[in-house]
Amino acid sequence: MHTPEAQSLDFRIACLQECAQRCATINERYYQLGSQQRALAEEVLQHMRNRRDSAPIGDMRRAHGGLFCLQGEAGTGRTCLLQVLKDKPDYEGMPCQTTATTGIAATAYNDGRTLHSLLGLGVQDSDSTPQ
């Protein structure tokens, strides 16, 4: 039978192992990007880091925020690049949200949503009055 201290240590070890695996997966995805994709990823990530690091302590609204739009032809690696641009900031403590213009497109990403949904811009019936 494990003591509470041993169970706590086992839990912490499991958490560290999970964290290390997640980091390895993120880094693997990052290094699978092409050189142009990696350069773009670094530019966006550096912008996010600068924004976070320059915000006054406690002012999380200024630490987060900013938008970027990723466009490209089919087969150019948008999904792979976007996955890195989602996972790496989350791992570094900079949560971000992946959006798409349609619900179908948003389903291509974990926790993806439409831009309208993120901004709270619902569709109203023509018969209803705004509340």
Image (cartoon, helix red, strand yellow):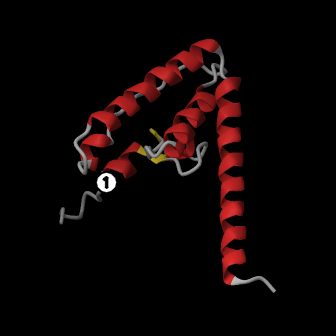
Q: What amino acid does circle 1 point to?
A: Gly
Q: Quadrant of residue 94?
A: top left
Left or right: 129, with 109 as reference point: left
Question: Which corner quadrant holds the N terminus?
Answer: bottom right
In the image, residue 120 sits, relative to residue 38, either above or below, namely below
Label 1 crowd bin: few (<14), some (14–19), many (20+), radius 10 Å: few
Tell which residue pokes out farthest to the bottom in this image: 1
Question: Which corner quadrant holds the C terminus?
Answer: bottom left
What SS does tag 1 mark?
A: loop
Left or right: 12, with 70 as reference point: right
- At 68% from the left edge and 69% from the top edge, which residue is drawn? 9
- At 36% from the left edge and 47% from the top edge, which residue is drawn? 116
Residue that label 1 marks:
120
Q: Position of residue 85 (x, y in %)?
A: 53, 33
Q: Quadrant of residue 50?
A: top left
Q: Position of residue 48 (x, y in %)?
A: 39, 32
In the image, residue 37 sits, relative to residue 62, either above or below, namely above
Q: Position of residue 25 (x, y in %)?
A: 70, 40
